Image (cartoon, grey):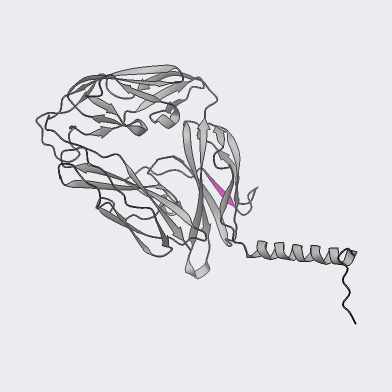
Amino acid sequence: MDRVTCDNCPFSSLLASFLAFALVLSLSTEQSFAFTINTPAAGSTLTAGSTVIAHVDPGKDTGIVKVRYYWYGEQDDTLVEQDDSMASGSIVAPVAMMGLAGSDPTFGGPLKVPQDRIGPMRLLAVAEISRGRLGPRSVFDEVIVTVEPSAALTTIDFETEKPLQLGRAGQSSAFGHVDSLGKVFELPVVADFTDGITRRISTPASGTNYESSSPKVIKVLPGGLLQIVGNGKATITVTNCGKQAILDVDVNVNEEPNEPPVADAGANKSVKAGSRVKLSGLKSRDPEGDTLYYSWDQVRGSKVSLLDANNSEASFLAPAVSEPRTYRFKLRVTDRRGADSLPAFVDVTVEP
């Protein structure tokens, strides 16, 4: 008997639909989903002091006990996870909110946007997973949002002595103890707003622009950093939202020529969870060949224990992850006469 085909019959259409549905179902069940912050969404703009409903998707991670939420500035290098809540010797970020299985939504809830911040902020969500006798482990997700106050800026001011005196010529140039040619520093700048809140606006990301009346004395670097390049007087002017503040600076440092060093944190890399990861600053250099002092900090991702953070090579143990996650580290180097480099960054992607 010949085989009968009927491409237009209802049964053929039903069979095709069923096969298509089965294929989609198969793909969806095989696809891996990571623990993810759904709201607030990455790149969104939030009002300072407002409350948003934080919501996460557990993905394929089962056994989640709780999720802790933390707020950080985009480049803050003070990171903390739940097990470090009793850490001493440094400022730790408080838990902004904790979501439990019975929360609404699950592992989420009302999250207060920082009242006194402005500009890019990182929201870090750390989920604690119970593994019975194996002990807990954690997974995380992180998004960057922009925080804007609803109030208007009224005045700008420098939180420093006026006029600012830099340099103690003739003193020992021991590392970290004197201002010198090449020294890089940040001026603390704050602004008052009509809601009565004073907010720090030291970075260009918060809308602040810097100008130096004498770049041969004080040079403006990227990121709102300033550098001593010569002796003399200079006026630093900052502007934001049409307001401005002026600071007179008097520089009197040892005139020994000194070019700032250059930090090199190495190339970005991908590693496997559980491996020992080495961060290398060995390619950092100083134009005069001076000995360098190193400082590593973590500025992205859930906190890891960083060993030898003041050496040319630092290391950490790549944590367990269910999906690839990126950890970012910052390196600054300083020569023996006190000149600083601009920060260098390296990303380490940890894979399961």
Whether the magenta-drawn stretch holds residue 97 is answered as yes
Can you tell which quarter of the image residue 219 is in? Answer: top left
Task: State whether residue 213 is above or below residue 135.
Answer: above
**Among all residues in the image, which is located at the extreme front?**
2
Residue at (33, 22) in percent of width and height: 211
Whether the magenta-drawn stretch holds residue 245 is answered as no
Count up the numbered dots. Answer: 0
Residues in magenta? Answer: 95-103
Residue 336 picture location, percent across and down: 16, 42
Residue 13 picture location, percent across and down: 85, 63
Q: Is residue 258 left or right of residue 199?
A: left
Q: Nearer the viewer, residue 217 or 131?
A: 217
Can you tell which quarter of the image residue 190 is in? Answer: top left
Task: State whether residue 329 is above or below residue 225.
Answer: below
Residue 86 picture location, percent across and down: 39, 50
Q: Nearer the viewer, residue 290 or 3?
A: 3
Q: Is residue 167 left or right of residue 30?
A: left
Where does the N terminus fall, quadrant-wise? bottom right
Can you tell which quarter of the image residue 182 is in? Answer: top left
Residue 34 picture location, percent across and down: 56, 57
**Among all residues in the image, which is located at the extreme bottom?**
1
Q: Is residue 106 left or right of residue 157?
A: right
Task: State whether residue 204 is above or below residue 283.
Answer: above
